[in-house]
Amino acid sequence: MIEQSISIERMEQAVNLFGAFDENIRIIEQELDVAVVNRESSLKISGEGENVMLAVKAIQGLLSLSAKGEAIGQQNVRYIIELVRTGNEGKIAQLAGDVICVTAKGRPVKAKTIGQQKYVDSILKNTVTIGVGPAGTGKTYLAVAAAVAAFRDKQVNRIILTRPAVEAGERLGFLPGDLQSKVDPYLRPLYDALFDMLGAETYQKYVERGNIEVAPLAYMRGRTLDDSFIILDEAQNTSREQMKMFLTRMGFNSKAVITGDVTQIDLPADKASGLKEAMRVLKGVEDIEICRLGEADVVRHVIVQRIIKAYEDYENAKNGGKGKK
């Protein structure tokens, strides 16, 4: 049993570090099996030697983020604990990245993990970025943030968001309403992200002007999209033909982001995923980058990470340790 001290210069840092009702410190104590006590202008960490060492690194990393103006929440704490556990504490400095976009309510949107930072850098650097990863890794939200930032900066004249209207159990023909009403549920996540970034009124104004378009993938056929930031969401549900059609819509001064999760394919069993094929075909093509986000990049509730991990373990066990086929 050993004890180490960490000095805290400002009270605001301590408040940010501890979180509401000391929830951040409780996570550190539970995850690393240490005790953390606040004494005047310092923290006392006690426990087994290796655990204390990891806790000190984690707290110092969190304090460095706090000093850069980052709000510390449960996601930051769990992610940094994982970084120090795997010997990657040197990467913590990369987490306080640039603001991608500011939402309608004034909230800055930033990458929250190393994987997300690489994904955002790829979007800014390349003409086509393919972002693949499980639910909750911010694939769509960060892409929409980058699109809004490019539009506000007048780098592009239009934002085009699209996804395939593939049935996951229900059929379009049996849904109520006209065609737009039938496809709107499939496009809802894209609407939500745009409303968050722009606000409902501003979004509607740009839609009426033709600066923003949210439509099913089928609507893209036969078009050439110049001066546009194009996002294809849920791309795992595209056919080979649809993916090729989409990729060949690119015009001058346009940028495309393709997002998907290859573990959630809703296509018939005999139909190949256009996303999986595109990842094989386009690997190594200049100005196209494939970014893989993983369990560690999930920024939703911690239970989402646990669910994803449980499914990965199940698939590995079912396939003799070879993962999902």
Image: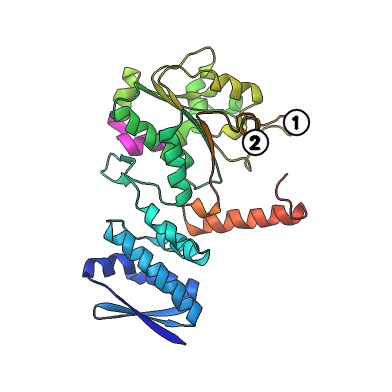
Nearer to me, 22 or 246: 246
What residue is rendered at 60% in x and 34% in y? 236
Please tell me whether residue 24 is drawn above or below residue 257 in the rendered image. below
Say whether residue 10 is left or right of residue 156: left
Disc sitting over residue 270 in the figure: 1
Please tell me whether residue 159 is drawn above or below residue 251 in the rendered image. below
Residue 121 in the image, given as x and y percentages of width and height: 42, 40
Residue underneath mark 2: 266
Q: Which residues are magenta?
A: 191-202
- Dot 1 falls on a residue whose secondary structure is loop
What's the amino acid at mark 2? Answer: Asp
Mark yes or no: residue 231 visible: no
Residue 119 in the image, given as x and y percentages of width and height: 46, 41
What residue is rendered at 34% in x and 21% in y? 157
Nearer to me, 90 or 241: 90
Which quadrant holds the C terminus? top right
What's the amino acid at mark 1? Answer: Asp
Residue 129 in the image, given as x and y percentages of width and height: 50, 33
Please tell me whether residue 238 is drawn above or below residue 311 in the rendered image. above
Mark yes or no: residue 196 visible: yes
Disc sitting over residue 216 in the figure: none
- Dot 2 falls on a residue whose secondary structure is loop
Please tell me whether residue 223 is drawn above or below residue 55 in the rendered image. above
What residue is rendered at 44% in x and 86% in y? 2
What residue is rendered at 46% in x and 83% in y? 47
Residue 15 in the image, given as x and y percentages of width and height: 27, 68
Q: How is the image coloured?
A: rainbow
The quarter holding residue 209 reads top left
Magenta span dominant secondary structure: helix
The quarter holding residue 191 reads top left
